[in-house]
Amino acid sequence: MNEPKVWTPAVARGLRAVDVEAAVGLGLTCAALSWLTADFDGGVITGAAVAAFFMSFAALLVKRGGAALLTSAVAGIVSIPGPSIAGPGMYKLVLLLVAGLLFEVVWLMRRKWSGAVAAGTLAAMSIPMMLLVLSGEGGLLGSAVNLSLLSAAAGLVAALLAVAAWDSVAHSKWAIRFEVVGRSRAWHAHRRRRLFNAERREMV
């Protein structure tokens, strides 16, 4: 006898094709925006804030582990030749991969908007510190700490903006289609059971 399929939370399963496409698109947009804002004062802070925004939005949109990391990885690869953060270089891929990993750890522990905000703040804060580690300039520790605190503040604001942006589109037709497309039969059966149970509770 075949065992019944058990529905599992989205975060416990792999990324769908549409999730990968969304994360790649967000990563490319993140890299493009980082390029455009590279000439602003506080390039590291601006780059950290932009990364925090797009990682937070990716996590809220996809709701599966790995979306934020993929977004940061794509942004890091595309940003290598660009002027963002501290000029061209492979170091940007390392910075954003570490930031993405830290984001995922926090996000997997708390998959709510507050988790996205906390994860975005920590990810942004990590970028100046990792930049210091990669540079090997120990004498710049004080400046790196100050830059990290400013980046954390910028990341907090950026993550909150991402939450607001997601909240404004979460119930739109495209967002609903995005969530439903590619779902398994088990997911749709679980959804029908939830709706049925909700209707029964209302009737009691």
Image: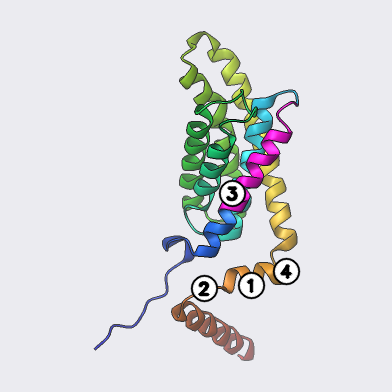
In the depicted view, which residue is nearer to us: 159 or 87?
A: 87
Stretch in magenta: 24-39
Real-space Cα distance between discs 2 and 1?
10 Å
Badge 2 amino acid: Gly
Real-space Cα distance between discs 1 and 4?
9 Å
Q: Earlier in the sequence, mark 4 or mark 3?
A: 3
Real-space Cα distance between discs 2 and 3?
24 Å
Contact between marks 2 and 1 (CB within 8 A): the answer is no
Callout 2 environment at 10 Å: few (<14), some (14 to 19), or many (20+)? few
Badge 1 amino acid: Arg
Element at label 3: helix
Element at label 4: loop
Circle nearer the viewer, 2 or 4: 2
Element at label 2: loop
Query: Is residue 189 shown left or right of residue 83?
Result: left
The quarter of the picture where the N terminus appears is bottom left
Q: Position of residue 39 (x, y in %)?
A: 74, 26
Q: Which residue is mark 2?
A: 182
Badge 3 amino acid: Ala
Q: Earlier in the sequence, mark 2 or mark 1?
A: 1
Q: Which residue is mark 3?
A: 116
Query: Is residue 177 shown left or right of residue 131?
Result: right
Q: Which residue is mark 4?
A: 172
Callout 1 environment at 10 Å: few (<14), some (14 to 19), or many (20+)? few
Q: For the point 54% across and 84% down, which residue is it?
A: 192
Q: Position of residue 117 (x, y in %)?
A: 62, 45
In the depicted view, which residue is nearer to us: 94 or 55?
A: 94
In the depicted view, which residue is nearer to us: 142 or 58?
A: 58
Quadrant housing residue 169: bottom right
Q: Which residue is mark 1?
A: 177
Real-space Cα distance between discs 1 and 3?
22 Å
Q: Earlier in the sequence, mark 1 or mark 3?
A: 3
